[in-house]
Image (cartoon, rainbow, N blue to C red):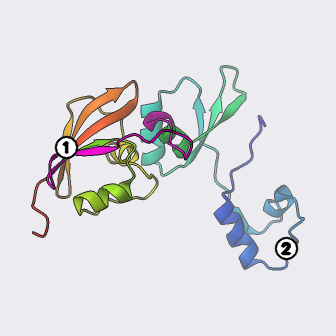
Amino acid sequence: LDHIQGIVYAKDLLQILVSRPEIDLATPINQLLTSQQEDDLRFTHEPYYIPETKKIDILLNDLRANKIRLAIVLDEYGGTAGLVTTEDLVEEIVGEIQDEYDEEEELHHWEVPGEVLIANARIDIDDLNKLLSTDLPRTGFETLGGFIYDHLGSIPVEGLAFKVNDLELDILKVEGQRIAQVKLRRLTPVGH
């Protein structure tokens, strides 16, 4: 575990298997990637190492800027302490995702119907797009909080306001590193 040779994503492994149908599925991955097939080596990614003391917001920015989805965490002795993904970071920041056993909590209410919405940062982006008749992207995250972290690239402070498309977003409440509540205001009326 302390000598990581490279990282292969499942989607890349599938591409190798599709392009080389002669490969036996029982072949160990290390044999597959050291089989002198240069085309296969392009699917091996260099590990991205970070110290375990790296701040979450800085790491999230680094991963996003370098288009990396996984980092190997090193302890103070240089040994592997674990790994972290962008998904892990977003979940750590946004908070727990509610499941079917949790009590239902209100994720939004209208301050001005059809115009100004107060939303919990855990609200699903698809639900938010329907409520506001907008088209916020949903790549790499599912919630409003995930969208905000992705868009800003850092942990916002309370009172921060910014514009995206035809919306103004105002961070109303931050709890620790987690965005809790956001005000969303439509800048143009629906249908214009």
Callout 1 environment at 10 Å: few (<14), some (14 to 19), or many (20+)? few
Which corner quadrant of the image does residue 159 belong to?
A: top left
Q: Furthest-top residue in view?
A: 76
Quarter of the image containing the N terminus? top right
Callout 2 environment at 10 Å: few (<14), some (14 to 19), or many (20+)? few
Q: Tell me where residue 13 appears, x and y as whole percent.
A: 71, 65
Main SS, magenta residues: loop
Under mark 2, the amino acid is Ile
SS type, badge 2: loop
Q: Residue at x 44, y 47 (%)?
A: 64
Q: Which residues are magenta?
A: 92-116
**In-image side of 183 versus 136 (left or right):** left
Which corner quadrant of the image does residue 79 belong to?
A: top right
Q: Residue at x 25, y 29 (%)?
A: 158
Badge number at residue 102: none
Pointer 1: what residue? 162
Pointer 2: what residue? 23
SS type, badge 1: strand
Q: Nearer the viewer, residue 139 or 170?
A: 170
Work out whether residue 39 can be spotted: no
Q: Is residue 170 magenta?
A: no
Q: Tell me where residue 92 appears, x and y as whole percent.
A: 50, 34
Q: Tell me where residue 86 appears, x and y as whole percent.
A: 52, 44
Q: Is residue 138 above or below residue 101?
A: below
Under mark 1, the amino acid is Phe
Q: Is residue 23 above or below residue 145?
A: below
Q: Nearer the viewer, residue 188 or 27?
A: 188
Work out whether residue 9 can be spotted: yes
Which corner quadrant of the image does residue 73 belong to?
A: top right
